[in-house]
Image (tube, rainbow, N blue to C red):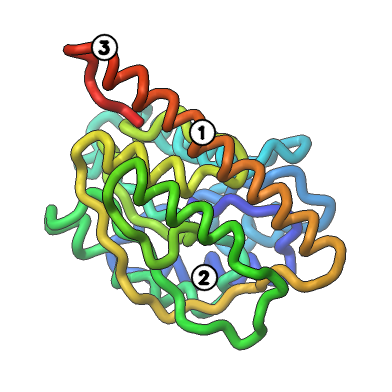
């Protein structure tokens, strides 16, 4: 499942790398309001492509892609793989996406309900100061007791059950934090796995600063909503915990 926007220069290599992974039998690209040829490039590379007429955000793109996949599974009701596990992939990984295979075995073998890729130092350093990462890590730890090394990593493999536990997804850039908190809150297992990935990082220019500001806002909102849910659940005996 590849949500992306304006990745025409990178999406072909990313799709081709994911298609050859063991265990991957279908690649769905959701073009979230691109102004370039991302959709056409992804289609030519062999992906199923869904296009949002305008940008709705990463969470909405993931939900569109999963809904499309489940509809396909419903049509082919004899499919022995339904409902499929899910592999979430950023569209800018290019050839390094071929290394995502390490996320799959723990889920297929039942050792984890969701795996999260932890990335090595990137070839190009970003322009951030770690504020969003600290907010996400501290918030996840306070809510669940689990400490994430890279809480904002978008590359994840998860079961259908885990996805449902986190649905509806936290909007926008809060999606990764929401996934982690909700899946752990459902009593499921999360594991971080080192993965040799390289992607485009946000720079120090004004666009990078705006992106990080939006990311901080969405992560804060996701955590705040889950803190409220937790507080309500603790005050109401017999209410199932869902953060």
Q: Is residue 87 above or below residue 99?
A: above
| Left or right: 61 as drawn, with respect to 38 | left
Q: Quickly name the residue at label 1.
A: 224
Residue occupying image coordinates x 65% and y 70%: 129
For numbered disc 3, what is the local secondary structure?
Answer: loop
Quadrant in the rendering for residue 93: bottom right
Residue occupying image coordinates x 45% and y 75%: 119
**Which residue is outermost to the bottom?**
123
Q: Is residue 41 above or below residue 79?
A: below
Quadrant in the rendering for residue 81: top left
**Disc number placed over residue 215 in the picture, else none:** none
For numbered disc 2, what is the local secondary structure?
Answer: helix
Alpha carbons under labels 3 and 2: distance apart: 49 Å
Mark 3 or 2, closer to the camera? 3
Residue occupying image coordinates x 57% and y 41%: 220
Depth check, front residue: 12 or 59: 59
Q: Quickly name the residue at label 2.
A: 16
| Left or right: 233 as drawn, with respect to 55 | left
Alpha carbons under labels 1 and 3: distance apart: 19 Å
The crowd level at tag 1 (other Cα within 10 Å; few <14, some 14-19, many 20+) is: few
Residue occupying image coordinates x 86% and y 63%: 206
Q: Quickly name the residue at label 3.
A: 236
Report whether residue 83 is seen: no
Mark nearer the N terminus (3 vs 2): 2
Mark nearer the N terminus (1 vs 2): 2
Q: Return the x and y of residue 70 as percentages of the image width and height.
A: 39, 32
Q: Return the x and y of residue 82 as percentages of the image width and height.
A: 26, 38
């Amino acid at each position: 499942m590849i949500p992306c926007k304006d990745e025409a220069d990178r999406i072909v290599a990313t799709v081709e790398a994911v298609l050859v992974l063991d265990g991957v039998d279908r690649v769905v690209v959701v073009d979230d309001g691109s102004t370039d040829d991302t959709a056409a490039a992804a289609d030519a590379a062999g992906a199923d492509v869904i296009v949002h007429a305008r940008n709705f955000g990463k969470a909405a793109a993931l939900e569109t892609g999963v809904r499309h996949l489940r509809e396909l599974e419903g049509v082919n009701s004899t499919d022995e793989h339904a409902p499929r596990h899910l592999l979430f992939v950023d569209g800018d990984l290019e050839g390094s996406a071929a290394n995502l295979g390490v996320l799959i075995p723990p889920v297929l073998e039942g050792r984890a309900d969701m795996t999260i890729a932890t990335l090595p130092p990137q070839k190009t350093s970003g322009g951030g100061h770690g504020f969003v990462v600290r907010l996400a890590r501290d918030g996840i730890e306070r809510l669940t007791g689990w400490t994430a090394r890279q809480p904002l990593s978008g590359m994840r493999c998860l079961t259908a059950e885990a996805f449902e536990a986190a649905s509806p997804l936290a909007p926008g850039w809060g999606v990764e934090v929401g996934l982690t908190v909700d899946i752990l809150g459902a009593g499921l297992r999360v594991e971080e796995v080192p993965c040799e990935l390289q992607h485009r990082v946000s720079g120090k220019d004004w666009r990078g600063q705006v992106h990080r500001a939006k990311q901080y806002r969405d992560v804060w909102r996701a955590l705040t909503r889950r803190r409220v849910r937790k507080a309500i659940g603790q005050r109401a005996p017999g209410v199932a915990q869902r953060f």
